[in-house]
Amino acid sequence: MSKVLSPSPLPYDVGRLKELSSDEVKLMPKLTYCGHSCALIESEAGNVIIDPFLTGNPLASHTPEQIPKLSAVLLTHGHADHLGDTIRLAKRDGAPVVATYELAAYCQSKGTEAVTMNIGGSYQADWGRVKLVQAWHSSSYQEGSETIYTGMPTGVIYSVEGKTIYHLGDTGLFSDLELIGKWNGPIDVALIPIGDHFTMGIDEAVEAARLVGAKRVIPIHYNTFPPIECDPEEFKKKVADAGGRVEVMKPGEVVEL
Ligand code: NI
Ligand code: MN
């Protein structure tokens, strides 16, 4: 299913492209960490963003205007630090919001396209495949004094061009992470919350990384606000001691998948 594009009009690293002998190269999907729980995944199949909390995020690497044209917005749950700029970005690009039924339907009521799913289900699009899995958390959106129920919280597994990314969402530790990793693996990258208070903290996240068994782990959901301050290098060291591999990414940094 991989398409081949001429590299010239694309903003990829020119030095690397020059090393390639062919004038037609396969560009691997790449992931940009945008701060907090937000990840942008760009590939030849299309661009998707997960949990685009940019406006009001003190660690955001991008403004909504700096986000490239999206094929979809994937959401783990409805809390404001995840829903973020979803409505605006989805409407801008005519991109569907892909999430649990209640959350996607809420976004649809605000004028976006929607793919309403639920836990355990998959959705195949030309821009990739999404599966929702469980997360132990809560999910609602505050609109003025009204609390809107936005379904069960989830993790999001996104596969594109042979690569699989598992965004755990906001969650505590649970043993079915192992089952999820086994059934949906191999997982190339897992994004795991480490900030404590609202999600698991570092030591439980180390165990979560072991259970999921991803080739690489990127810590998320820390240092955005005082209650979730922690040292990602401590997480990195503890995962390394257990035989895993962590990439601590600064907001705005990019990894090839
Ligand atoms: Ni949350
Ligand atoms: Mn959160």
Image (cartoon, helix red, strand yellow):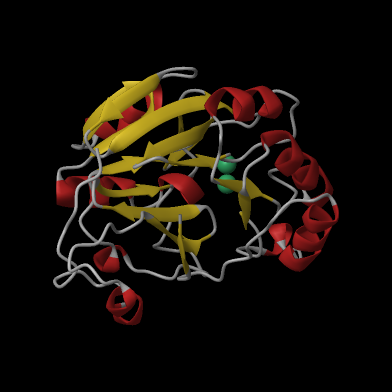
Residue 40 in picture, x, y percent from top left: 38, 55
Vertical order, 252 against 239 (above or below): below
Q: Is residue 145 visible?
A: no
Corner quadrant of residue 116: top left
Vertical order, 100 against 58 (above or below): above
Q: Looking at the image, which residue sits at the far bottom?
A: 15
Residue 28 in picture, x, y percent from top left: 35, 56
Tell me which residue sits at (69%, 56%) in the image: 245
Q: Nearer the viewer, residue 5 or 49?
A: 5
In the picture, measured across the screen, residue 200 lies left or right of residue 71, that is: right
Vertical order, 68 against 184 (above or below): below
Q: Nearer the viewer, residue 1 or 73?
A: 1
Tell me which residue sits at (43%, 27%) in the image: 131
On-image quarter of the N terminus:
top left
Q: Nearer the viewer, residue 53 or 218?
A: 218
Corner quadrant of residue 228: bottom right
Q: Is residue 49 visible?
A: yes
Vertical order, 192 against 141 (above or below): below
In the picture, measured across the screen, residue 92 lies left or right of residue 17, that is: left
Residue 63 in picture, x, y percent from top left: 33, 68
Tell me which residue sits at (74%, 28%) in the image: 174
Q: How many marks?
A: 0
In the picture, measured across the screen, residue 50 lies left or right of residue 186, that is: left
Residue 257 in picture, x, y percent from top left: 45, 54
